[in-house]
Every structure is written in C-alpha cells, then in structure tokens.
Image (spheres, rainbow, N blue to C red):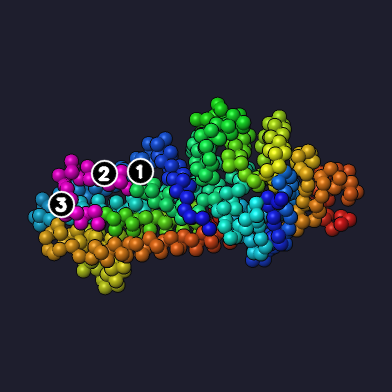
Amino acid sequence: MTGMNLRRAYAVFLRYMMLLRGSPQRVFQIVVWGALDLVLWGFLTKYLAEIGGATLGIIPTLLGAVIFLEFTTRAHQGTSTPALEDIWSNNLLNYFASPLKIGEYILGLFAASVVTSALSLAVLLAVALFAFGFTFSIGLVLLGYLAVLFIFGIALGVFGVCIVLRFGPSGEWWVWPLTALLSPFMGVFYPLAVLPEWMQTIGYLLPPTYVFEGMRAILLGTESPGGLLLGFILSLVYLALSYGVFALVFRSVVRSGMLSRHSAESV
Amino acid sequence: MSVLSVKDLRKEYKNTVAVDRVSFTVGAGEIVGLLGPNGAGKTTTINMLLGVLEPSEGSVAIDGIDIRSDRSAAIARTNFSAVYAHLPGNLTVYQNLRIFSLIYDVPHATERIEEMIVEYELERFRNTKSGVLSSGEQTRLGLAKAMLNKPKLLLLDEPTASLDPSTANTVRKKMSSIVKTGESGILWTSHNMNEVEEVCDRVLFLSHGKILLEGDPKTLASEHGKKNLEELFITVAREPLSLDL
C-alpha cells in the first residue's frame, strides 16, 4: 500500500475553490447568513439589555455564542458542501473510479473547510466589531476554543457526507441542520445547569459544550476556563470516529453498488 | 502480457446474480469488445473493474496488480469514459482536465493537458463550462480525461454513442492507433456491431451475467451460422439457448 498523495487531496480542494471563484452566490451563502444571524441577535440582546437592565456581560456572552455557533456550522457545512457539490454534479463516480483514496478525499474537504470557515469567521468578527463594538477579550484561550469547534465541525461535516453516501441524495436534508440539531444540548445561550439531567448528559459528550461554558465563565468573570482540554480530546475522538464511520459507509456502498449508481435517487 | 486479468468474477445481490463467474483477459495492444443486451452485466463488470463495486467473488488484476491488495495503484493504471459519467458541468474544460491530471498524478500535466485539448479538438471550449457542451463534445472531453494518464487499461462504455458518424470514426481510429503501440489495451462496450467489427480484436458476448460466446468479431457470426454480428447479437439477446455452443 502506498501512502497519502497530497496532489490528489489538493485536487479535491482546488475543485471547490474553482467553484467558489466563479460563483459569487456560493461565497454569499458562506458569509451572509452568519452575519445576518449576528446582526439579529446583536440588536435583540442590545434591546434586552436596555429594557431589562441585564447584567453587563449579557451582550458579549450572547454575541460570542452566536459567533462560535456560526463558526461551528461553517466548519461543518464547509466540509459537507464540497462533497454535496460532487453529488449534485454526479462527480462521485469520476472520483472514486480513480486512484483517489478516502483519506485524500477527506483531507481535501478539510482544506476547503479551513478556507470557508476562516472567511466566515473574519466576516463575523468584523460585523461584531463595527456593529456592536464587540471583541473577544478572552485571551489566547480563544485559539483553543476555535480549534475545538473547528475540529468538531469537520467531524460533523464528515458524518453528514456519510449520511448522503448511505441514504442517497435525499439524505442531504439531514446534513444541513446537523449543528442546529445538537445546539440545544451544547448550552449555546444558557448554562448547561438549566437543562434536564438527560440533556446535560448528552451535552457533556459534545465538545462545543466546554467552549460555550468556558467562554461564559471568562466573560462573566465567574470562574477560570475549564474543560478546554477535555473538549479538545473529545473533538479529536469525534474526528477519528467520523473517519472510521466514513470508511465503513464507503465500504458498504461499494459492496451494495450504491456508489456506482449514486446519481439516481436511491432510497 | 495481460493488462487486465479477470478470474471467476461474480456479483450477487440479494436474489439476483448480476455477473456469474466471468473470466477473461485483455492483452496489451488489444481491443476487446464486451457485448450483450441491456442488463447482461456489462456495466456491473466495468464497475467492478473500476473498484466502485465490490465483487462477491473472484479477482481483478490490472497490469498485474490485484485490485483488492492495492486498489489505488491498480486503478492508477487505468482510466475510463462512460456516457453516464460526464465530468462536472460547473467546471470549464480546462479546469476539469487540470483536476483529473492531479487526481491521476499526471507527470508534466500542463503539457499533457494541452496535448489532449488539441487531440480531442477542444481548443475553442477551453474556458467553456463543460455542462453547456453538446453530448458529443462532452464525450470528447471524457475521452481526453481518460487519456490524460496514458492508461495501461482503458475502459470505454459506449464511447461513440452520442457522436456524429465522422467524429465517431475519428475516435475509433484514435483508439486503434493507441493500442497499436502495444503498451495498452482497451475494453470496449458498444451496441453498434459495425463499430465492434471494425475496432475489436476479440469480443465477449455476455448474457444473464455469463460469457456466452468469445471470439474474433470477423468470424464469430459465421461460426454460429449467422449472417453478421448484429444477427448474432439479436440471437444472444432473444434466444441464447438456441445457439450452437
């Protein structure tokens, strides 16, 4: 067995960059929805703070939460969207009837997500700064938080690709809302302690929970950031798990013949 | 030397045997026609050769490399063009060739892409999105992509199906000249029996997943008491048991 060929991973990455370069509407969906969310939440929290006499920390914690949640969503969709583009253009057969290995394919998706997530984050931070005067004043731990969210987002993206591979193009409708489906358990806008016990248990299994809890703790000055290391380890576990599930699903669709007739609506 | 060696290849779904213990070879310098009616198992066989469908039993070796022991290395020695696998329509002709030159790790890719663009008469479509090309132009693009890596084994699934007679004739001549170098072989499926007779050195007739007949396309029909290959094809499709095997 030969090792990973970075040129092939680069091809997967380059194909998506070529699509983005020639298509402003694709770039639009990467930057605009998150910014729109941020504007809505930003003005809502500003209003709530004015009428409710909320504590000083409410605006930064909510804006910080929106930015982190959106960043996770972008990392997730930044991984699954290039794969969906391959499905929409019937390109899977061309790819997988070639020497391309699944590790190279996933690495290409990962690289594409780095670019789109970074672009989205830059826009979010700019909007937060210029519209609400918000900056993340949490120090270097911010980089750790972003790493946890990015890795977990990538893992969700790979899980999303598995769903589409396994269930056919209609599985796409499960891919888009994956982050949103998990968000109630992650304590995005509220402390985990307000959730029922069973929801807390699920929450503790999700890496972003440690980021949202930690960020709130720092911004409200209640305690030092805890759980970052645990969140980081958990996100790596999810990433490894997503790769393993992808390999299993790929094997299964190669055995069943679904890969070779993937352009057809299958289930 | 065989560029493709298939032994006892079988694909079984729940209640159906799509391909049933098929064995054959394709030699370097040879064009082998894989013929049969719709549903005979041709595309299933090709999908197994390309590694996108796992055989239930049997083995496939491309240029001596078993596809199960090193799929990527085996597939790197092949390439394919099929009417059902057009290249992404949202990339230009040049972009598509660039992407697949990276995927197939083509040495001196820039020069090779230019050669293919000229050889398959795609110059004026270089910056055109391939989705807006006519089906014949898309077929030419598919062939250009298939030849990028100078494959040892070329799999062509109805390569001239959407081409006008003149272009189809050019493609047949090109493919024949490619194998004449003696370095590569082609497995060719087609429903055009005149074409098969013109280009193939040997044909395999598949029926219900089995190889029913094998031989020289120029003599096979008369060996089975038929006027021509087309008549033989119709018999294989309609009444395979009536054949004197």
Badge 3 is on which residue?
A137
Q: Can residue B98 be seen in this view?
A: yes
Q: Nearer the viewer, mark 2 or mark 1?
A: 2
- Residue at image position (60%, 48%) is B77
Residue B143 % position (x, y): 62, 38
Q: Which x, y percent locates residue B47? A: 63, 53
Q: Are marks 3 and 2 in contact (CB under 8 Å)?
A: no
Three-letter amino acid code at disc 2? Ala
Answer yes or no: is residue A207 visible.
no
How many angstroms separate mark 3 from mark 2 (CA)? Answer: 16 Å
Residue nearer the viewer, B202 or A52: B202
Judged from the image, the secondary structure of the residue bearing numbered disc 2 is helix
Q: How far apart are marks 2 and 1 (CA)?
A: 14 Å
**Percent position (x, y) of residue A183?**
30, 60
- Residue depicted at 72% across the width and 34% down the height: B173
Magenta stretch in the rendered image: A117-145
Q: What subunit carries mark 1?
A: A
Mark 1 to mark 3: distance in Å? Answer: 28 Å
